[in-house]
Image (tube, helix red, strand yellow):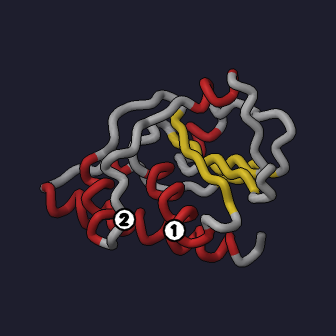
């Protein structure tokens, strides 16, 4: 039995924000946390998110998108379920039984970014850095 805290990051498509959050928590405190991510409507991995993570030495290109509802139906249990989508989407999350805390950290959706490829990269880097900063602050409190 692992005494690691179990954390699930949830966003809409499990294509960018929750994937980045999962990767950062594993990198920064994988010795303390068992981490998964999932989406409400799983899509395809966002190539821009893959690229901005690769820029800082984290490869998420082999990750698969997963369904939060599948995890719920499997009876998975978590200490923390953290939504990383905008407010309107966070309300659609299933309530996982025996979850110690439900948290919401709102981040802009990289799949909604407009502009040139360079502009999309720049905006996604901002989201990536905000996610990392939020996780670094959170792990100091847990």
Please tell me in which quadrant of the rendered image residue 136 appears. bottom right
The 10 Å Cα crowd at callout 2, few under 14, some 14 to 19, many 20 or more, is: some
Q: Is residue 13 above or below residue 70?
A: below
Q: Residue 36 carries which label?
A: none
Left or right: residue 100 versus residue 21 is: right
Q: Position of residue 64 (x, y in %)?
A: 41, 38
**Observer-nearest of 20 and 84:** 20
Of pointers 2 and 1, the one earlier in the residue sequence: 1
Helix, strand, or loop for circle 2?
loop
Q: Where is residue 28 in the image (x, y as percent from the top left)?
A: 56, 72
**Observer-nearest of 52 and 91:** 52
Position of the C terminus, as image quadrant, is bottom right
Q: Do the residues labelled 2 and 1 touch (CB within 8 Å)?
A: yes
Residue at left offset 69%, top offset 21%:
73
Left or right: residue 49 versus residue 24 is: left
Residue at left offset 53%, top offset 47%:
85
Q: Where is residue 72 in the image (x, y as percent from the top left)?
A: 69, 28
Residue farthest top in this picture = 73
Please tell me in which quadrant of the rendered image residue 108 appears. bottom left
Residue farthest front in this picture = 1
Quickly name the residue at label 2: 58
Residue at left offset 26%, top offset 53%:
48
Quickly name the residue at label 1: 27
Please tell me in which quadrant of the rendered image residue 75 appears. top right
The 10 Å Cα crowd at callout 1, few under 14, some 14 to 19, many 20 or more, is: few
**Observer-nearest of 31 and 131:** 31
Distance between the Cα atoms at labels 2 and 1? 9 Å
Helix, strand, or loop for circle 1?
helix
């Amino acid at each position: 039995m692992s005494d690691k805290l179990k954390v699930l990051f949830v966003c809409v498509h499990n294509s960018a924000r929750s994937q980045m959050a999962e990767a950062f928590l594993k990198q920064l405190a994988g010795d303390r946390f068992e981490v998964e991510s999932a989406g409400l409507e799983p899509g395809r991995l966002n190539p821009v998110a893959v690229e901005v993570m690769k820029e800082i030495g984290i490869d998420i290109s082999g990750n698969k998108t997963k369904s939060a509802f599948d995890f719920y139906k499997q009876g998975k249990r978590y200490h923390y379920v953290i939504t990383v989508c905008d407010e309107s989407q966070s309300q659609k999350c299933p309530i996982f039984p025996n979850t110690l805390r439900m948290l919401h950290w709102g981040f802009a959706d990289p799949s909604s970014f407009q502009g040139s490829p360079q502009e999309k990269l720049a905006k996604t880097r901002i989201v990536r850095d905000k996610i990392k900063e939020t996780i670094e602050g959170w792990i100091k409190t847990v």
